[in-house]
Amino acid sequence: MKKSVADIKNMSVLPLTRSDRVRVTVGMATCGLASGAAPVMEALTAAVAELGLDNVDLKRVGCIGCCQHEPIVEVTYPGQRKVTYIKVTPEKAREIAEVHLTTGRALGKYTFSALAGETGEDAPVTYAEQTPFFAGQERVVMSNCGVIDPEDIDEYIRRGGYQALGRALTEMAPDEIIEEVTASGLRGRGGAGFPTGKKWLFASGNRGKVKKYVVCNADEGDPGAFMDRSVLEGDPHAVLEAMAIAGKAIGSDEGYIYVRAEYPLAVERLETAIAQAEEYGLLGDNIFGSDFSFKIHLRLGAGAFVCGEETALLMSIEGKRGEPMPRPPYPAVKGLFGKPTIINNVETFANVTRIIARGAEWFASMGTENSRGTKVFALGGKITNTGLVEVPMGTTLRQVIEDIGGGCPNGKRFKAAQTGGPSGGCIPASLMDTPIDYDNLGAIGSMMGSGGLIVMDEDNCMVDIAAFFLGFTVDESCGKCTPCRIGTKRMLELLNKIREGRAEQGDIEKLEDLALYIKDNSLCGLGQTAPNPVLSTLRHFRDEYTAHAEQKRCPAHVCRGLACYVIDPEKCIGCKLCQRACPSGAITGELKTAHRIDPEKCIKCGACMSACRLNAISVE
């Protein structure tokens, strides 16, 4: 069943669904399955069979991005707009089949109209592209996610898949491929933003004379980040195709995808995609009848955050302990098994496929002068609309949080956003109009990272946030170098002193000096960026550190060591619920009389506040 370039071109003009059929898709990525997509798919399958709807194509797809509204079902009649149903249950699925798939009448009450409270039978259909969440996005990397069946290679080809590989093998010399990627301005989406074309150029010498490797870093370990997982679950062939293109560019015939073992669905779909591509002759020997061969292997990550660092990742693939290695030499010179190696992450490779297919000029037309293209963010935390968003580089933080994300829920005030995970920094509300790109984020003490974007509101304590991310780094340090292994622990100890009201004069300055030392002296990029959450919060929220250390109070009332629980005598009715819940016997008072909390006995567990039904207990 090997395919030629002509076969691929002929298939690409075919629609996903014939004009005489109705396409119905169910989002079955991890987010959808966790929300109950499997029973929804079962209900639709049964209903379509029982109703004899022979004109319906029922397909699974990946995540379309609005994860909080899963399970999601989309219905497309020929020549009509796609109708997106959100928070679908098996019962709703049955009704959708009985009404929409039978009569053609869409049920507006189950679309985005429901978010505005319009749930009646006459509720209008609100289309996905009419919502602020989708209207502000530009889909490049995620253009196939939620659209195609990730386990059907034909659907990928019908969306233009593998045409870029055909072009690279039959119309372009290896140097021309690198020149195209360089001209696009694509920078690595995994963290530091190194120019992709330049990395490929470094590894391109001695083609055909030296064994080389192409490696995809799919070890996505940042808290709150799930961009790469969603691409692998929704569009795995885009990564395989790009890796083969990279192999042609540098003179490699073998690649590895290093993916987290905690991503079983992504692994399963990659295995399926590799098998399908090999069956079609799009991976393996003499691709498209050329003299170019390329094979891809999967390697499961061992669960260590440090293996996201490229040299530690290579060590892990080789079966060794995942520890960073000193650089130089860089992997492009001496990498996997001692051979020249290029390493890019999932999102970077997914961009390559589009660049070769549509041209460098098209890609470079998006974004900013030094940060071209788009960026995928996993938007989470205290935000109304959570999920995956893809926006042009240079989009401001305000646009992402307020326009697309819908702002903080419950009328809370936006306080900060953490970008770049444990290696990034916190951006305050005063800098919300900062365009998001590599240079601007670096200038304000943060970084792009892989794309996690965690939103915090006025109830968050920035000292506590810094301690959370630093604690993650302490747990995940490989321990190879002293600054990271010991220094981050000492930083965390100082942070905990500050949070618990035990800070001494000069502790804030010690914390800052230690952070700068670790940043300058750690072995790898993860150790060098570990102090960033502390340094950025010291830079933008120093007054909170001062309040903790000098005034012995937490302005956000989060840090338990500085909390003081009090009972409002005007609200307390003496029901004794709080007294019975208190594990330390700190609450006194008779039945039907106002109670009191003894601060000397209070262990600040918050059990009393949880037990009180009248909101009579507060934290000062």
Image (tube, helix red, strand yellow):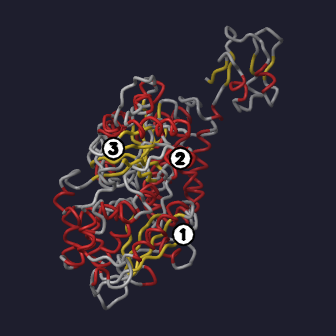
Quadrant housing residue 359:
bottom left
The numbered dot on residue 152 is: none
> Which secondary structure lies at badge 3?
loop
Query: Where does label 1 land, which residue?
Result: 300
Disc 1 and disc 3: Cα gap in Å? 41 Å
Using the image, determine if residue 246 lies above or below residue 24.
below
* Residue shown at 42% from the left, 72% from the top: 276
Disc 2, SS:
helix
* Residue extending furthest toward the bottom: 209
Residue 425 visible? The answer is no
Judging depth in this view, the residue of 21 and 138 nearest the camera is 21
Q: Which callout, 1 or 3, points to the residue nearer the camera?
A: 3
Residue picked out by circle 2: 37
> In this image, 591 relative to 169: left or right?
right
Do the residues bearing badges 1 and 3 touch, measured as CB atoms within 8 Å?
no
Q: Which residue lies furthest to the left in this view?
A: 361
The three-letter code of the residue at mark 3 reads Tyr
